[in-house]
Amino acid sequence: MAELHRPHTGPPAPPAGFVAALRAAVRGGTDFGPAARALTTMDASNYRRVPLGVLAPRDADDLAAALTVCREYGVPVVPRGGATSIAGQATGTGLVLDLTRHLNAILDVDPAARTATVQPGVVLDDLRAAAAPHGLTFGPDPSTHSRCTLGGMIGNNSCGAHSVAWGTTADNVRALEVVRYGGEVLRLEQTRGMGPDGVRGTSAHGPGRVGDASAHGPHGVRELIGAHLALLRTGYPDLSRRISGYALDALLPEHPGGPDPVRAFCGSEGTLAVVTEATVRLVETPRARALAVLGYADEAAAAEAAPGLLPYGPLTVEGMAADLVREPAGLLPRGAAWLFVETGGATPAEARAHAERILRAADAVDGAVVTDPAGQRALWRIREDAAGTATRMPDGSEAWPGWEDCAVPPDRLGPYLRDFRALLAGHGLRGTPYGHFGEGCIHVRIDFDLLTPPGIARFRTFSQELADLVVAHGGSLSGEHGDGQARAELLPRMYGDELVVLFGAFKDLWDPDGGLNPGILTRPAPLDTNLRFEVLPKRPVDVVFGYPQDGGDFAGAVRRCVGVAKCLTAEAPSGGTGVMCPSFRVTGEEAHSTRGRARLLHEMLAGEVITDGWRSTEVRDALDLCLSCKGCRSDCPVGVDMATYKAEFLHHHYKGRIRPAAHYALGRLPRWLRLAAPFARPLNALARVGPLAALAKRLAGIAPERTIPVLATETYSRWLRTRRDRGTRVLSSDRVVHLWADTFTEYLSPQVGRAAVRVLEEATGRTVLPPPAGGCCGLTYVSTGQLDAARRVMRRTLDRFAPLPGHPVVVLEPSCAATLRTDLPELLPDDPRAAELAARVRTLAQYLEEYAPDWTPPRLDRPVVGQTHCHQHAVLGDAAERRLRERLGLTGELSGGCCGLAGNFGFEKGHWEVSVACAEEQLLPAVRESEPGTELLADGFSCRTQLDQLGRPVGRRARHLAEVIAEGLEVGDGERSSRR
């Protein structure tokens, strides 16, 4: 194992005087510190470049002033939106412009004109939400719609699933205001219906002369186009998904409506100017939608069928093969590949009829029409998560972008896919194609070896051969995401040297100093340089967790984050039922997102920007607001597990050092509760004395706003043993139930354990045995990074359970069940007992479903609100709980997200505001809006405590499902007694 890598030299510093000059000129925030730089070294591509710093301009004037200073000092600039680009164009070595912080306003929505005017940092879903009340939407819709920005979409000429109906971003932009390097402001407008001049020019600080720019762009562009008319008329493939290079053919005089500078600008990847404002076209949203899902024998058959469906006017024709679908195959009809064909209509019946016509016309193996919105969302989720899902092969090996979105004419897609598969096989590579079959655009992640020189050499050779294959089929190297560094080097293979030289001349007229996103599109760096993996340690780092999904390599675990940024959303994923990433949704700071933290860990391992390794304060501060909710483990398409990475980091960060007080108080909570249990009554009384409680909280590092929970005066284990001693009959070993005595049930909420005993014995006819003494899952030690202690506790627990092999273990506290299920075997990978115990863990509902399938639970028939525990969602799943609630007659959905208490997190000093804000996202509003008589349901002790301390309705207490069922059983017993 290796220590953290330490390079001998760091990245270059800003030019002398630049930082002071920039800060004097702008009002927006600047940050040249290591954390800000580390967060922006990468986008969603294979590439990494270290910037000098980050600026978040306040407005267009701020941006123009910054570009003036950058030109004066020769500092290059890279505009950055959601940074979901997969070709490297959102990385740079100069000043990063964060356009999401302040330039994120929707300035106008004009339903009559069907247009909207937006700033570049507007997230696509926010624009769609603003247009929706008018029955309108923005047509292009990449799968990253919840976090990609309009500025980024314009820069890449993004498309999405609905481009067969509504076109690319370039088809939907009417006017742009842009700032050139040096501060000059231009307004670009479509010339269609406007007359000859589509560009108006101004200086950075006031209006300039109209005519400073032509209808083609800056001065000299008209002459450049005029001198190369024949080349521009013959040099471009006739392809709707042709995104590669500059769209200079849009400036031809015969272009419909005349030269179109807006279309020529779209797809320029931040190399010409920076967008400050855009007027975009909105399209009518169908009132109803239906989805025809068509199954085919293989992907080539599906690809060959796609063009035949276009005359029916679908909204989408998306395709994917079986190797992309890992779990929810039951949602799909028979076949080894599928087309998703969406239709619209004025009514549900019309949309369905449209889909059924397509189903009848399609020569498919099998098919179905889905009209249920929830069913459609579940199917689309498979497709939208593919950018992350495809980064791992079924055997767990890594796959990477780089050839993510080539496009060929749709009628050539079938033959192209066959040739593509053959090329992969010839190089010993694997990939999982999917994408926009109706437009011939294919996404794929390929298992390139980008860590070793031979693997990188093969990456280069394959890229060259694939470029030739795409061109041979009449296609474009990029059909959606742009060229960036990944493909710009290969543009001569598609366009020829003469046209690529013309691209460079066009770039020079817009940006003569070469300051805007240098190395992208023109004069690019080689495609096999600046790879983000080359700075990582060459040998595995010495770590504690086993990381079984990543070959025991912590760097491999960190590499899981490919930057698709599903964590950077304003709402919980999966329609609000997901969890990831609650702290980002509160702060809006990328450092507090899963992607941001993964980026900081990557740079910590690299040692170039963050140079103090495990002692890094930048990484520590970013992880401080991680709730360890494990939401990313399930909601992140690639399964990043930041809770585990945080525990690992804290272990090393504080090794041999004094820890925060809360780590000693809350991290070792099982020990303190065991010692305190005999003195519960006096301690409870003392905790209610204000000055004493305040002192105790200050010494323990507990937030002063928190109330210390009440200790149980009789522990669950003592109650159960007393009950046994009073004569409860113990049955044979196959007629017993092992109910885990977790710390919270044992010392803080034994009523949950008592209720579970009642339910289990009623439902199964088995006897619940007293738990082995001293068992603990180690959760609190893990969450505070005390991993040596956690392993000691876990080994002791395994020793206690050794005499009880084979039996399922019912665990009532979801966080403890999740710890046993995942952390236990990952911290003790060499102890077979750990995996054996993990496999035996069941929740109450899971156990009842498995061991009492014929039991009829009491009918409770009332609505519920409350919280699905985040660990339940992420690790255990709640399908059995949902089915049990349905059988009980408990209606309604529990909140997603996180309650905000999250074990020790919400109790720690400095976390109160974030903790409350997390609860206010879904949980507290749902409780406040619930009707009287609604059951408050929360299986997690943290969730119940949060509700109790943040103002639950008077007379209502949040309860574990076991308590609710047990009460129903008692009521049923009472009714039967009264009838007798």
Image (spheres, rainbow, N blue to C red):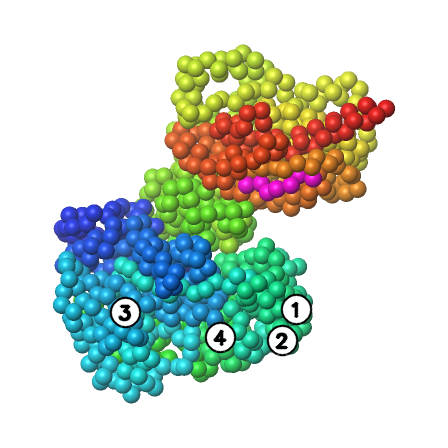
For marks 4 and 1 on the same chain, the one whose residue lies earlier in the sequence: 1
Q: Is residue 429 visible?
A: no
Q: Amino acid at mark 1?
A: Gly
Crowd class of label 1 (few under 14; some 14 to 19; many from 20; radius 10 Å): many
**Of pointers 3 and 2, the one earlier in the residue sequence:** 3
Query: Which mark's residue is nearer the viewer, 3 or 4?
Result: 3
Residue 891 lies within the magenta run: yes
Amino acid type for the residue under numbered disc 3: Glu
Q: Residue at x 74, y 35 (%)?
A: 858
- Percent from the top left, x then y, of residue 578? 53, 47
Judge whether residue 618 is colored magenta: no
Label 2, label 4: how far apart the Cα atoms are: 18 Å
Q: Residue at x 65, y 43 (%)?
A: 882
Q: Secondary structure at mark 3?
A: strand
Q: Which residues are magenta?
A: 889-895
Element under label 4?
Answer: loop
Q: Are marks 2 and 1 in contact (CB under 8 Å)?
A: yes
Mark nearer the N terminus (1 vs 3): 3
Direction from residue 25 to residue 469 in the image, left or right: right
Q: Which residue is mark 4?
A: 440
- Crowding around mark 2 (Cα neighbors within 10 Å: few <14, some 14 to 19, many 20+) is many
Q: Amino acid at mark 2?
A: Ala
Cα distance in 3D space between marks 4 and 1: 22 Å
The mark found on residue 362 in the picture is: 2
Image mark for residue 367: 1
Q: Residue 118 falls in which quadrant of the image?
A: bottom left
Please tell me the numbered disc located at residue 191.
none
Relative to 714, does residue 894 appear above or below in the rendering?
below
